[in-house]
Amino acid sequence: MDDDPDPTSNPGDQGRVTPTPLQEDIATLVAEGHSNREIAERLALTPEAVSNEIAGLFRALGVISRVEIALWAIEHELHR
C-alpha cells in the first residue's frame, strides 16, 4: 500500500507538489521575461488563467516572486 496520499508530492519538500506541464511552460516563459498577457497570447489562454497558474506555481514551488519562478525554471533547465 502506498502511504503517500498525493503521488505528485516530493518527499522532503514540505507538501509542495510537482508543477504541471502547463505550469512548466509558463515558468519557462516567465524566465524569458514575458508578461502574463504575452504568456496568455502564446499559450492561447486568458491572462486570468495565466495568473491562476502562476499562483499555483507559487504554491507548488514554495516561492513568492516571479524571479524565484524564473530561477527554478533555469535551475531545472526548462528555459529555451
Image: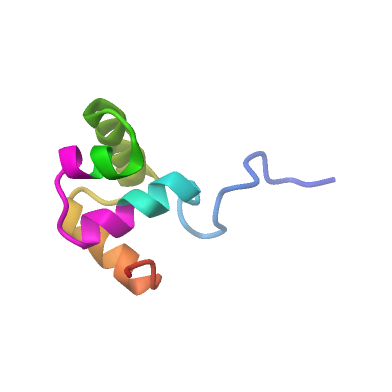
What residue do we see at 23% from left, 54% from top?
30
Give the image location of residue 31, x and y in percent.
23, 61
Decide if residue 23 is in sight here: yes
> Which region is colored magenta?
27-38
What residue do we see at 67% from left, 39% from top?
5
Decide if residue 16 is in sight here: no
Q: Nearer the viewer, residue 74 or 1?
A: 74
Give the image location of residue 4, x and y in percent.
68, 46
Magenta region includes residue 35: yes
Q: Residue furthest right?
A: 1
**Which quadrant would the C terminus be assigned to in this image?**
bottom left
Magenta region includes residue 59: no
Q: Is residue 49 above or below residue 25?
A: above
Q: Is residue 78 above or below residue 15?
A: below
Q: Nearer the viewer, residue 26 or 13?
A: 26
What residue do we see at 24% from left, 44% from top?
39
Q: Nearer the viewer, residue 28 or 13?
A: 28
Give the image location of residue 52, x and y in percent.
30, 31
Q: Main secondary structure of the magenta part?
A: helix
**Which quadrant would the N terminus be assigned to in this image?**
top right
What residue do we see at 57% from left, 58% from top?
11
